[in-house]
Amino acid sequence: MKNLLVTGSNGQLGRDLINYFADKQAVSGFDIDRADITDINSLRKIFKEIKPEVVLHTAAYTDVDGCETNINLAMKVNAEGTENIAQCCREFGSRLIYYSTDYVFDGTSGHAYIESDTTNPQTIYGKSKLEGEKRIGDTINNFVIMRIAWVYGRYGNNFVKTMLKLGKAQVSKAGERDEITPIKIVNDQIGNPTWTLEIARQTEPLIDSDLTGIFHGTSENVASWYDFASEIFELMKMDIKILPCTTDQFLRPAKRPANSALENKRLKNLNINIMTDYKSALKKFLVLHGDDIKNEM
């Protein structure tokens, strides 16, 4: 058993990492209520107490639109905070696994991005996460960067939960015989919907290896947001009216990549890719949690 430390332990990925490794490793975690990653001295106290062999770094400022107006905060947390984590890993001899994002790319490629493709982030969020990647590489040698995308899970806010909430509201209106307004969903952005539990499983072989560098770790096959929503409602047997729309019809402060698809090329070349088809993973997730999520709405 290895001593694991999860940053951002209250987040949707952090919580599932802790739950997944609870019976496999000696795992502990912290969030902002216990230590601030932008304060290296508070981090050193945690590292001194836990003495982690591996750090799974999920803590981040992930409000993509909020980053556009809170530039300093985004860079402080996602770049400087990540550098602090890397510095502590170097001081205490810990291996670092950092979860990055598809937003490091500009989304204009005609194919799924592989690890060696040129980065060109178009948002502050993407720029801050890429800067975090660079600072890790400048600080330590024993690290893995895993780029993930379109993440959903049991905890936190995510697309699956939003769709179930909107779908439930529409069903309620239909029951009251109110006029139904179709849910507009973007159909010209594609990516790999990825369950947090799948990410945790994919992390496991990287923990025990001496592999370093950048990896992509998303579910297999791509979908548009419209496709993703359609699959959610079909699996939940919800008769929901949805309407495809373009990105231009659903403007947001931060530019969304048209192509967020990632290819797990390095994992596949090493025969350690265990990510499944996104539809299979989504079905398992909804069987386990779909009804509970709906009842919480």
Image (tube, helix red, strand yellow):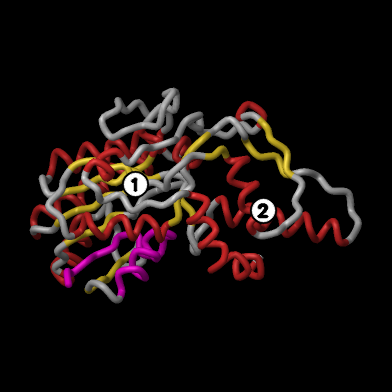
SS state under label 2 = helix
Q: Nearer the viewer, residue 187 or 111?
A: 111
Please identify the quarter of the rendering in which residue 44 is found.
Answer: bottom left
Residue 17 counted in the magenta span: yes
In this rendering, position of residue 211 left or right of residue 100: left
Q: Which mark is residue 5?
A: none
If the image is split into quadrants, where does the N terminus sit? Answer: bottom left
Q: Nearer the viewer, residue 117 or 252?
A: 117
Residue 216 counted in the magenta span: no
Q: Residue at image x 15%, y 55%?
A: 209
Q: Which residue is mark 1?
A: 217
Query: What separation in Å lies between label 2 and label 1 (alpha carbons)?
Result: 26 Å
Crowdedness of circle 2 by 10 Å Cα count: few (<14), some, many (20+)?
Answer: few
Please identify the quarter of the rendering in which residue 102 is found.
Answer: top left
If the image is split into quadrants, where does the C terminus sit? Answer: bottom right
In this rendering, position of residue 220 left or right of residue 119: right
Q: Where's residue 207, x and y in %?
A: 20, 58
Q: Which residue is mark 2?
A: 234
Q: Where's residue 73, x and y in %?
A: 37, 44
Q: Where's residue 236, x and y in %?
A: 66, 60
Q: Residue at image x 21%, y 47%?
A: 144
Amino acid at the residue labelled 2: Glu
Amino acid at the residue labelled 1: Gly
Please identify the quarter of the rendering in which residue 11 is found.
Answer: bottom left
Crowdedness of circle 1 by 10 Å Cα count: few (<14), some, many (20+)?
Answer: many
Where does the magenta region start and end? 1-22
Q: Where's residue 237, x and y in %?
A: 70, 59
Q: Nearer the viewer, residue 183 or 252?
A: 183
